[in-house]
Amino acid sequence: MTIFKDSEEMKKYLGALYDEAKCDPEIAPKIKQSGLSIQYRYEEPHGIATILADRPPTQEGAFFDVVWGEVEGLKPDVTMSMKADIAHQFWHGAINLMAALTRRQIIAKGPIPKIIKLLPAVTPMYEMYPRILHEQGRDDMVVKKK
């Protein structure tokens, strides 16, 4: 059984995380500074989210845009493919990126050292995501810390 019942539910919760992160004064400038387009390709359920830190944002107050679905003509700098459950666990801080890459739970294409360099920037999202789930009444989805 997967954590998200369908693509819409995945987009709702991961989308809320990305939407908050793109405006966060601690997280967003560091991602923007990378100048990368980073595409997350999810399965079970299927979904595609792309962080466009390689161009000016269209939303006031945001440092970059996040687009769901295919972006016509885009060749992302980095593509990260994984099951949605892996993303859910990752954003709780329950999955180590290097271990997940080694185990092929996450398949990355592109300049991996640049992504690894971004890890300290996204670490605050490990607390942001469970809080977002809690605020939306989904404590049942929060991964308990061991």
Image (spheres, helix red, strand yellow):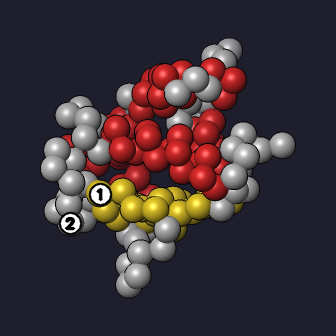
Q: Work out whether mark 2 precedes mark 1 in sequence or the reverse, and give the earlier one.
A: 2
- Left/right placement of residue 26 relative to residue 138 reads left
**Residue drawn at (65%, 62%) of the image:** 46
Query: Horizontal and vertical percent for residue 103?
Result: 71, 50
Which residue is at a point 72% across and 40% down the rendered structure image?
3
- Is residue 1 visible in the rendered structure shown here? yes
Q: Are marks 2 and 1 in contact (CB under 8 Å)?
A: yes
**How far across and how far down the image is residue 40, in percent?**
51, 59
Q: Give the residue type at disc 1.
A: Asp
Closest to the observer: 128 or 103? 128
Residue under label 2: 55
Please tell me whether mark 2 sits on a helix, a strand or a loop.
loop
Residue tagged by mark 1? Answer: 65
Instruction: Please name whichever residue, 92 or 49, is drawn nearer the observer in this view of the structure.
Output: 49
Instruction: Identify the residue shown where x is 65% and y is 50%.
Output: 84
Residue 67 sits in quarter = bottom left
